[in-house]
Image (tube, helix red, strand yellow):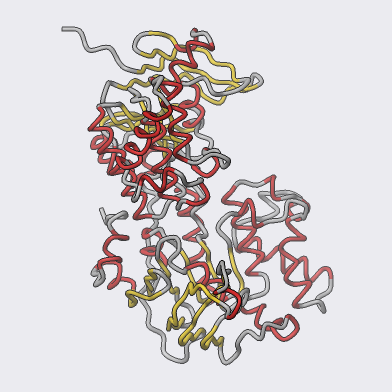
Amino acid sequence: MNAPQALLELKDLRIAFGGQAVVHGVNLSLQAGERVALVGESGSGKSVTALSVLRLLESAELTGQVLWQGQDLLRQTPAEMQRIRGDEIAMIFQEPMTALNPLMTVGAQISEVLQLKKLLSRRDADARAVHLLAETGIDDPERRFGAYPHQLSGGQRQRAMMAMALASEPKLLLADEPTTALDASLRLQMLQLLADLQQKTGMAVLLITHDLALVRHFADRVAVMEKGHLVEQGALADVFSRPQHPYTQKLLDSRPTRDGLATIYPAGAPLVQAKGLQVRYPMNVPGFRGWFRQHHFTAVYGVDFSIMPGTTLGVMGESGSGKSSLAQAVLGLIPFGGELSFGGQTWQGIPGRDKALRQKVQVVFQDPYGSLSPRMTVGEIVSEGLRLHQPQLSGPDMQARVLATLAEVGLTTAEFPDLLNRYPHAFSGGQRQRIALARALVVAPQLLVLDEPTSALDVTVQKQILKLLQALQKNRNMAYLLITHDIDVLRAMAHQVMVLQAGQIVEAGPAEQVLHSPGHDYTRTLLAAFPDA
């Protein structure tokens, strides 16, 4: 008996740009109704492989075959591809804020697809769009129909993207990192929604991702890409329990671990002490009510916490929970109410008076691509803090301190000749984050605020940076305030955990207690997105 024809089959697919090959002979197939995950790190070629199916790669040289129900899409005319795109094969992109048209309401964008692909009248298309929004779980779909993308939350925008992709009832959905921009609990919700919709419609799904936790929850089969090569594929259980290729084994071994990090309870006074810490933002109120008194939005409601020297306080919560406002208050970047002290000192809001404290409290941001000036060399970036806080250092002494700090984070002149004169663009994402770390460490801070320090990095690089942070904390006895929504990172790094919801602490305590025996329903919801196994 002959096997059923594959819905999509890639045969020896090769992709090149300007003669430079980026995908080397990929062979992959999907059956109708199947869920396949294409996994790999940045630069592995997984996204360009998916985009080649719809021939959305400008100036790309494509060879081999992309068989769609037996027909080679690489030989179809532009008009035939226009019909197939959206109608038979749809795509969800990684960042809905850039994928959605900011000048059109989300309802109008979904309705437009229905009018073009299904030839519905404007009235019928609008009604169908509202129904699709309801199917994807958006609350009050009639009102959301008339909302612009910026008026929706990240999760709502991603649901609107799903509604648009499903509008023409495609047979195949290409989902390119559809949950990367979302909070942990939202990721699981969106993946479950996608699975429910897939079962309801019977479409096949090709999920492109580097998030192995999501793959565990979703896929029937897994295909692993490394540097443009498909190195392993098979059933989910087989690949995850018995990986054959060294790269697959490396990916599966990249989950953050504590690496011997002890649960410590040092004696003595806290390095950071907050009592009744409150953050409020002024807000405009329309009408005459706004004339007579000032109105505020409260982002953080009187929270209490402390951080001991050499320990990490992890703060978890979804977008809008108050994590970023809390971090900015600790860094003295915004006004705050209540008490906040660092060994008896507090922020005065006056640069001259805050200078000494500024040296003790440093920050490492989420995105190493955006946090380093592209116009400054590595030497200028790392020495900037020294020039401000220790201007008495001579040139040779300052350079020696910079080189020693860079070596401490794993960047040496032996490996990177002329290191100090290079610019950030010459380094990878993980190397840039090491430069950002060196910039903070060079002034010998006592507290490091880590704002999602690894979320922009691939899983293998993430593990390297976390191990480095653990070693630095042990060697320097630094305290960390770790802001993250990644529970795996908290499990690896935190000694104490504080859970924020809508600006209030709903649970706090030792990491092993909060992360393994949570007492609050909200904490349990967050943890469900990152199971221990």
**Percent position of residue 500, x then y:** 39, 70
Q: Is residue 455 left or right of residue 501?
A: right
Residue at image point 44% right, 60% down: 319
Please determine whether, in this image, residue 139 is positioned above or below residue 299: above
Please determine whether, in this image, residue 224 is positioned above or below residue 476: above
Q: Is residue 289 visible?
A: yes
Q: Residue furthest front?
A: 288
Residue at image point 47% right, 60% down: 467
**Percent position of residue 372, x then y:** 68, 56
Nearer the observer, 352 or 418: 352
Count of number-bearing discs: 0
Q: Quadrant of residue 246?
A: top left
Q: Residue furthest left?
A: 1
Which image quadrant: the N terminus? Answer: top left
Nearer the observer, 516 or 164: 164
Q: Quadrant of residue 103?
A: top right
**Percent position of residue 465, x then y:** 51, 57
Residue at image point 50% right, 41% down: 105
**Percent position of residue 76, x then y:** 49, 8
Residue at image point 28% right, 44% down: 192
Q: Is residue 245 visible?
A: no
Q: Quadrant of residue 493?
A: bottom left
